[in-house]
Structure formats: C-alpha cells, structure tokens
Image (cartoon, rainbow, N blue to C red):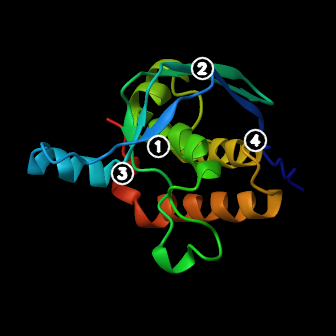
Amino acid sequence: MGINIQVMKEQIKSVEIHPKPDVRIRVIEDTDTNETKQAKVKYPFELFCTVTVTVKTDKRQFEFDIYNGYTYNGSDIPRCLWSLVGSRTDTQFLIAALVHDYALEMKAFIYKEILKQSISIAEYRRLTSLMFREKLKDCGVNTVKANIMSWAVDVFQHYGNRKGWKVK
C-alpha cells in the first residue's frame, strides 16, 4: 500500500509596495516620432518613482524593485469584456498590472537571482498570477472578480504564452 503525499502549493500572504506607485498614462505628443507613438500605444503606462515590491508567502519572503521610468501595457482585457470587467485604464487594475507585468518581463532575473530557482518555472508563473490577484483585491476589486481575472491571466499564460515561459 503506497502513501499518497500531496505537496501544498505556495500561497500568497501579502504583496506590499513601498512607496505608493505613481503611475501615469503616457500622452502622445505631436512632436513624438512614429516609433515613440507606437511605443506609447503598446505600453501606455509609466511608473514615475522607484518602488520596492515585497511578496510574503507561506514559505518565503522576497522583494524586488521596479524602477522609475518602467513602462507597461496594463491589463489586457478584451474590448468586448470592458462593460463587464472594466477597461485596461481602470485605476483599480493599474497597480496589480504593474506588479504582474514586471514579474513577467523580469522573470529570468527574479526566478534565477532572487528566488534562486527554488520553485519550478510553472510554480513561478502561478505565483505571478497570485500576486496579480492579491494586488487587485488590495486595490478594491472584489474577491470573486479578482479570482476570475487572476484565473484568466493564469490560463492565458499557461496555454497562450507557452514560448514566453522558457527561462534561459
């Protein structure tokens, strides 16, 4: 008779950001080059201060900095869902998207240098979705909506972005 041991997945206790992020929408100017205009459309949000993100889980605590000038695309919510969920410019989503987008963009650094590859890359992907969920709740999104949004992000990252999860 074998013993079935289930490994408990890491759970987020909190995601704190200090100081409060100053996120602004990047405005397209008449003097911008076409390349700059395209970049502002693709990454419409910019952080105007350096912040430290502290993540506490039931197994560890780690932190990383997001630097002044970081640009990101925000929540990728399909236009057809805006009336139900909200748009990508909804202020409730901006801080959660900041943390999530940075954690995805800098996954090689955070995964290798900060977490020292102590979890699998699949668990890191899941952890980024949980960080997104916790920041959504911290920013006033109700728990059900935050859970659904986090689940949708996690499913997309797992199935729609498989090539993006190879860490070199």
Question: Is the residue 56 above or below the residue 124 in the image?
Answer: above
Q: Is residue 143 visible?
A: yes
Q: Which residue is mark 4?
A: 138
For label 4, the SS is helix
Q: CA distance from mark 2 to mark 3?
A: 22 Å
Q: CA distance from mark 3 to mark 4?
A: 28 Å
Q: Is residue 124 visible?
A: no
Could you tell me which quadrant the N terminus lies in?
Answer: bottom right
The mark nearer the N terminus, 1 or 3, is 1
Q: Residue at x 33, y 48 (%)?
A: 43
Q: Residue at x 65, y 57 (%)?
A: 150
Q: Which residue is mark 1?
A: 101
Q: The disc labelled 3 sits on which kind of residue?
A: Gly
Q: Which residue is mark 3?
A: 164
The mark nearer the N terminus, 1 or 4, is 1
Q: The disc labelled 1 sits on which kind of residue?
A: Asp
Q: The disc labelled 4 sits on which kind of residue?
A: Asp
Q: Tell me the mark number nearer the camera, choosing from 2 and 1.
A: 1
Whole-percent x, y for residue 153 in the image: 56, 59
Q: CA distance from mark 1 to mark 4?
A: 17 Å
Q: The disc labelled 2 sits on which kind of residue?
A: Glu
Q: Tell me the mark number nearer the camera, choosing from 1 and 3.
A: 1
Q: Residue at x 68, y 42 (%)?
A: 135
For label 2, the SS is strand
Camera-nearest residue between 40 and 15: 40
Whole-percent x, y for residue 152 in the image: 60, 65
Q: Which residue is mark 2?
A: 63
Q: Is 37 situated left or right of 61 in this image?
A: left
